[in-house]
Amino acid sequence: QVQLVESGGGSVQSGDSLTLSCSTSGFSHRRYAMGWFRQAPEKEREGVAIIDSEGATNYTDSVKGRFTISHDNAKSILWLRMNNLQPEDTATYYCAAVPGNGGYTGELLWKHLELFGFWGQGTQVTVSS
C-alpha cells in the first residue's frame, strides 16, 4: 500500500528557509516518479517540483533557483528544500507519486502532472513579509 506522509511545514518570515520531508512506504523510488505540489487558498493546485525514477528534475518557474527536490531511496524519504521563501509561497504542500513515471520522463512528465495519483495529507507553509 502506497503511503506518503509530509512534515516540516511551518510559519516563517520572508527570506527564510524550510525543508519539507515526505516519508514514503509501499513502493521503491526507483520505480516511481515523485513530486511536490501546492495549493494556496482559492487557487488551483500546482506542481512545484518533480523527480522521476532516473533522477531528472523539473520545477515550476517561480521556484527555480530557490527550491531543490531530492530523495533517498534507502531511507524512503523525499525532500523539498525551500530557500528565500516569499509570501507567494504560502500554501499547503503535498507530496505525490506516480508508478512507472506515468509512462513519461523528464519534461514530458511535467506536462502530465495529472497522472500523479498517490497523495499525502499535506503540510502548511506560511510566509509572512
Image (tube, rainbow, N blue to C red):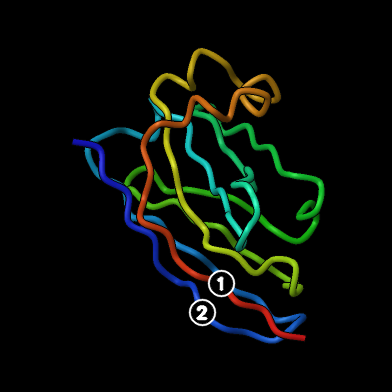
Q: Which residue in the structure is indicated by mark 1?
A: 125
Q: Residue at x 72, y 72 (%)?
A: 85
- Residue flagged by tag 1: what amino acid is it? Val
In the image, is residue 126 above or below residue 114?
A: below
**Callout 2–callout 1 Cβ contact below 8 Å:** yes
Q: Residue at x 49, y 22 (%)?
A: 101
**The C terminus lies in which quarter of the figure?**
bottom right
- Within 10 Å of the Cα at label 1, are there few (<14), some (14-19), or many (20+) other Cα atoms? many
Residue 33 lies, in percent from the top left, at: 48, 31
**The N terminus lies in which quarter of the figure?**
top left
Q: Which residue in the structure is indicated by mark 2?
A: 10
Q: Residue at x 38, y 52 (%)?
A: 77
The secondary structure type at the circle numbered 2 is strand
Q: Is residue 92 left or right of residue 75?
A: right
- Within 10 Å of the Cα at label 2, are there few (<14), some (14-19), or many (20+) other Cα atoms? some
| Snapshot quadrant of residue 126 | bottom right
What's the mark number on residue 26? none
